[in-house]
Amino acid sequence: MTTIFKRTPEQLSERRIDPWHYQPRFERQINKIKDNLGALTLEAVIDSKRGVASGATPLGANYLEKGRVKFYRTSEVEEMFLQAEEAVFINDEDDEKLKRSRLVDGDVLLTITGAKFGKSAVVSAKHLPANISQHSVRFKPDPKKVDAHFLVAYLNSKTGQVAIWKEAYGATRPAIDFPSVRSLAVPKVLPLAQRYIGDKVRQAEQLRTWAKSIQQKASETFPAYINDIQRNETKKYRAKELFTERLDSVFYHPDYIALEDKMRAKGCKRLGLITKQVKGAWNKNKADTFEYYEIGGLDIITGQVSSVPTPTTDAPSRAKTKVQQGDVLVSTVRPNRKNVGFIVDNVTQSEMVATSGFSVLRFSSLTLAAFYHAWLRTDDATTQLMRWNSGSAYPAIDDNVPLNIITPDFEKTFVDGWGQKLLNAQFAYVYAKRLTEAAKNLVESLIEGQLTEQQLIKAQQALEDGDNSLDQAILSKLSAEGYAIEGATPLFSDVDELYSLLEDAAQAEAEE
């Protein structure tokens, strides 16, 4: 059935006559911006000299695993950030050919088609040199007119997404063209209020950068015995000892034997002596919904695994194991991808349940769990897990395999020290995500009239004077549902912990 929205000629855009663009739900939300704050177009707040430009993909798409020039696709845009670790590379010649799509510090990248349509992130110097694909556009916000991080918080908010989808076209594959990008509605917000919101995104980025740095330093500190063995290229080899459960030749490859011999010579021991495997069933009668942890919720970058609230009546048959905060979840499929998750948050109001696709390991403390979660993502651990692979095109292991691999006999002080640092990194990731949610909720609260610009300005001025009491008051009222929602779970149950992590991150940044 065709839907018709009546409009007078004066109400029609020169660019659009299709009904999608004039849906009442779109117009109601955009009108809230105009009525409560005033609205500008994106074109009015960006650097007119740089303009809006799309990217391009090199001919033949000869991506490199390593190189100087990063190439960002839509898949690298996540939670207002560019995932530099996931980017491929192009050669310098391609960079010269694609000057129009070259990014500069301070640009905003906006995806204009594809599965991640309408997502945006701020580009910083650490992401460069870099180019973008034809599925994204780049533009540079004018700092005199708009805070780039505030703009990204708005574009990723509910209303910002409405503004983007209002301008979309295409039935099966949504897209947005240059004129539509330039005409996107942007709220008119006073500079200090913008800065207050933008700082939340900048703080989130600071926490993420600090957390990544800790994980990187830890990985460089861990011994890498696999690098010390001489790789064997022969296709024929003999096994001195056979295991009754494994008669396949690959299991006895000299590289696996050499790694095991090297590690045992260094006093390594079974991981099963340090941890235990959990297989406890959950109580389906305890709640109407449960938190379900499955492989799709695992973030390869952070190593965290997030849950999805699921009705108990819709529980999948694979929802088997009751889990808790601090559990380490080792994927039994594709262990070569380092699919090892860590449950950081503690969900107390309902059952926490993991899929049977995880081998659940429980350690005696959170710091110990954080330490061995990081070690299980090393090449030494991954190689050992893959030795027990029972698949061909689709690698898989039994759930008891993680207990049988061997791990270095680390000194207690080493484990305690790095365990605490790695645990702090995990909490930093959690708070970074909450800060991005806070930034989006603050934008929505302004648009809905739940907060005023003056409240944010006063909080920002107080912060600049060293007083965080107003900031703390605002943050404590934020929840996933919005601002000052009765009965909602706060985004920040412990604001002091957030401030402590931010202080540590700032100190680490200053020392570098």
Image (cartoon, rainbow, N blue to C red):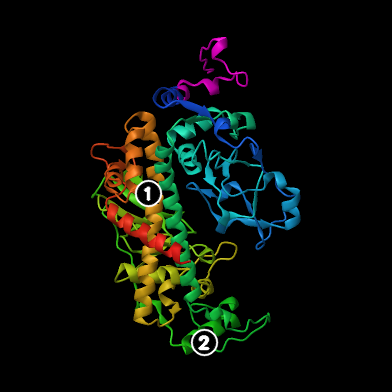
Residue nearest the observer in this picture, 2 or 466: 466
Residue 393 image-quadrant placement: bottom right
- From this view, report whether residue 284 is shown above or below residue 220: above
Q: Residues within 10 Å of mark 2 (few under 14, many from 20)?
A: few
Residue 394 percent location from the top left of the image: 56, 61
Label 2 element class:
helix
Residue at the spot 32% in from the left edge and 51% down from the top edge: 466
- Which residue occupies the foreground of this view, 114 or 291? 114
Which quadrant of the view contains residue 437?
top left
Residue 36, position as x, y percentages in the image: 39, 25
At numbered mark 1, what does the secondary structure look like: helix, strand or loop? helix
Residue ranking furthest to the front:
465
Q: Is residue 5 magenta?
A: yes
Judge whether residue 29 is colored magenta: no
Please state the horizontal and vertical placement of residue 165, each as a whole percent of the image: 52, 31
Q: Label 1 sits on what residue type?
A: Arg
Which amino acid type is marked by label 2?
Asp
Q: Specify start and end residues of the magenta stretch as a single range.
A: 1-27
Can you tell which mark lies on residue 261?
2
Q: Which residue carries the number 1 mark?
A: 434
Examine the rendered structure and indicate whether residue 432 appears above or below residue 14.
below
Relative to 355, say whether 241 is above or below: below
C-alpha separation, residue under disc 2 versus residue under disc 1: 45 Å
